[in-house]
Image: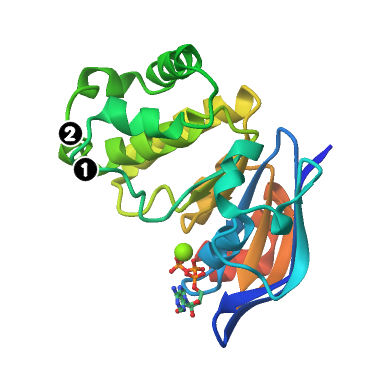
Amino acid sequence: MTLLSVEGIRSGYGSLQVLSEVSLEVAEGEAVAILGPNGAGKSTLLRTISGLITPTAGAISFDGHDLLAMPAHRIPHAGLVQVPEARHIFPSLSVRENLLVGGTPLPTRAAREAALDDIWRIFPMLVTKRDAPAGTLSGGQQQMVAIGRALMSRPRLVMLDEPSLGLAPLVVRELYEVLRGLVQSGLTLLLVEQDVPVALSLVSRAYVVENGSIALSGTASELRESDHVRQAYLGI
Ligand SMILES: Nc1ncnc2c1ncn2[C@@H]1O[C@H](COP(=O)(O)OP(=O)(O)OP(=O)(O)O)[C@@H](O)[C@H]1O
Ligand SMILES: [Mg+2]
């Protein structure tokens, strides 16, 4: 079943048009990547899907809802959450408090506590840091807090914007092991990633965005074999 459908989106900032005719689909349970160079419009695409930017053309539907008719603050309640590029954790709040912020869409305190228990199971490395101010954590741990906060509301689809940015290779590997486990347990993921080999090792399909349009798309193995991807993104 198609969970997210983006059709013919045109979007940008004021008079600057960034995206033109962008269409993509994500099926329930699928992990899909958006790849492409700096400035291509990947973050703009995620911001448009999560309602932070209103497109000037096109349609976006999620789980049967018309997202363009929904106020941005209601979108997480519909089950779609984004972890932004800059993470936006609250540095002076504890790890636990940061996670609880993500649980706001849940109806009861008991539901939030149960969700929190799940986050400690997903990210056991955060347990000993639960009462530490989030700003004192390492970059990798802060990224885990940002992802954990998004998972707190038990979303149907999570969008991650460059989770590996600024992290050491070993930390990226650890983070992606956790993401792999989440995908295997059924999480639907739309991932923007600059690290193409790492992204293609996780997802089943990907779209390549260049100059605000989808330049090509295919399964992870098709893209690994593509001459364009090999030359432009894999350095082969
Ligand atoms: N808030 C903004 N106001 C005006 N222009 C913006 C804004 N954010 C991004 N842009 C411009 O929109 C274009 C696409 O930017 P975007 O951030 O979507 O690229 P990206 O693919 O996410 O790149 P990166 O890999 O560097 O994160 C760029 O030309 C950028 O300068
Ligand atoms: Mg970006």
The structure residue drawn at horizontal position 37% and vertical position 18%, both measured from the top left corner, is 120
The structure residue drawn at horizontal position 17% and vertical position 28%, both measured from the top left corner, is 132
- Contact? badges 1 and 2 (CB < 8 Å): yes
Residue 231: % across, % down: 57, 70
Q: Secondary structure at mark 1?
A: loop
Q: Is residue 197 visible?
A: yes
Real-space CA distance between mark 1 and mark 2, rounded to the nearest whole angstrom: 6 Å
Residue at the far bottom: name it.
15
**Residue at which label 1 appears:** 91
**Residue 162 left/right relative to 59:** left
Tag 2: amino acid: Pro
Residue at the far right: name it.
1
Q: Quadrant of residue 149?
A: top left
Q: Is residue 174 above or below residue 116?
A: below
The label shown at residue 133 is 2
Tag 1: amino acid: Pro
Residue 66: % across, % down: 77, 52
Q: Nearer the viewer, residue 37 or 107?
A: 107
User: Badge 2: few (under 14), some or many (20 or more) residues near its Cα, within 10 Å?
Assistant: some
Q: Quadrant of residue 40?
A: bottom right
The structure residue drawn at horizontal position 54% and vertical position 61%, both measured from the top left corner, is 52
